[in-house]
Amino acid sequence: MTETRHTRLLIIGSGPAGYTAAVYGARAMLEPLLVQGIQPGGQLTITTDVENWPGDTTTTGPELMQRMEAHARAMGTEIVSDHITALDLSVRPFVATGDTGTRYTGDAVILATGAQAKWLGLPSEERLQGMGVSACATCDGFFYRGKEVVVVGGGNTAVEEALFLTNFATRVTLIHRRDSLRAEKIMQERLFRHPKIRVLWDHTVAEILGGDDGAGVTGVRAAHATTGDAQVIPCDGVFIAIGHAPATELVRGQVEMHHGDYVKVKPGTTETSVPGVFAAGDVTDHVYRQAVTSAGMGCMAALDAERWLAAQGADAPVPADAEA
């Protein structure tokens, strides 16, 4: 028989938003159940040094997430190693189905499934992630003081990343596969005026160089989009800025979305278009995408869920086949 687990507060996702929501939900005596997902800890688990988490001069992404998980457990959160493959928001209580076959029902749900950076798909890119290849200039730009970097992309994100990196790098090369940028005109003007930035038009990155004998990135091999002619650009870091993909497959068609499938929430809250369903972290944040802002939204989501549950007057009915 399929096992069914019921909880007042079901949290889907285990990054900073999910774990923080779990801490606050547990402190509110909601006895939350958190399903970790396919990548426990989220994007921070593939991040090396972290120097912008308040209270830690320096730490690593995996260490930070291990501490967050331990904190959530210590507060009383039940953490389950499973991956939610389906979520039905049309019934009460809400029903989630795990890859293990277990059904999880919740009176309220917090979506903290995060987002993933879009990558080029190069073997060298994957091999050098965390060794000079990054998808977040705000997170890692500090490490490239006095060095040369490459940014790949042509939209607002790429231009923002390039401009931000000029605060640290001596030279920023923006590589774009077309002959014009998609970014807003005012941002393009700032980019073109900046003395530290040069643009390499009509080129794609064919390979990221480096990694030999433990070394990080040493350069990129760029190929002309039409002729295929290649050139090597020496650099110490490569920032991929071709967009992010929020993990919203579970709720597509069930909650309102915007800005390329990010979950839309009511301004100033974490409330989605479905009462009792809340969203926190990168799954709803297309602007900041930082661990600390995700954690803040996780706090908000737990408080919003607590108030919403209290306003219902009574617990939602527990399914007859639910197990303790």
Image (cartoon, rainbow, N blue to C red):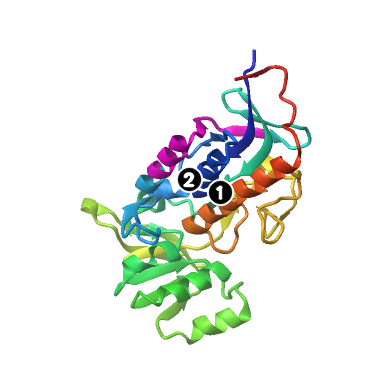
Question: Is residue 297 found left or right of 212 in the rendered image?
Answer: right
Q: Is residue 175 visible?
A: no
| Residue 222 pos. (x, y %) | 42, 65
- Given the image, on which type of amino acid does mark 2 rest? Gly
**What whole-number distance in Å separates the C-alpha atoms at marks 2 and 1?**
7 Å
Q: Secondary structure at mark 1?
A: loop
- Given the image, on which type of amino acid does mark 1 rest? Gly
Q: Is residue 127 magenta?
A: no
The residue sitting at 45% across, 61% down in the picture is 136
Given residues 233 and 166, the one toward you in this image is: 166
Q: Quadrant of the N terminus?
A: top right
Q: Which mark is residue 42?
A: 2
Question: Is residue 141 found left or right of 81 in the rendered image?
Answer: left
Q: Is residue 74 magenta?
A: yes
Given residues 323 and 176, the one toward you in this image is: 323
- Farthest residue in the left direction? 213
Q: Which residue is mark 1?
A: 114
| Residue 118 pos. (x, y %) | 53, 54
Q: Which residues are magenta?
A: 66-86
- Farthest residue in the right direction? 90
- Who comes first in sequence, dot 2 or dot 1? 2
The residue sitting at 78% across, 33% down in the picture is 91
The answer to whether the residues at label 2 and label 1 have Cβ atoms under 8 Å apart is yes
Question: Is residue 233 found left or right of 271 in the rendered image?
Answer: left
How many other residues sit within 10 Å of disc 2, few (<14), some (14-19) or many (≥20)? many
Q: Quadrant of the C terminus?
A: top right
Q: Is 292 drawn above or below residue 36 in the view shown?
A: below
| Residue 211 pos. (x, y %) | 28, 54
- Farthest residue in the top direction? 1
**Count of labels in the image:** 2
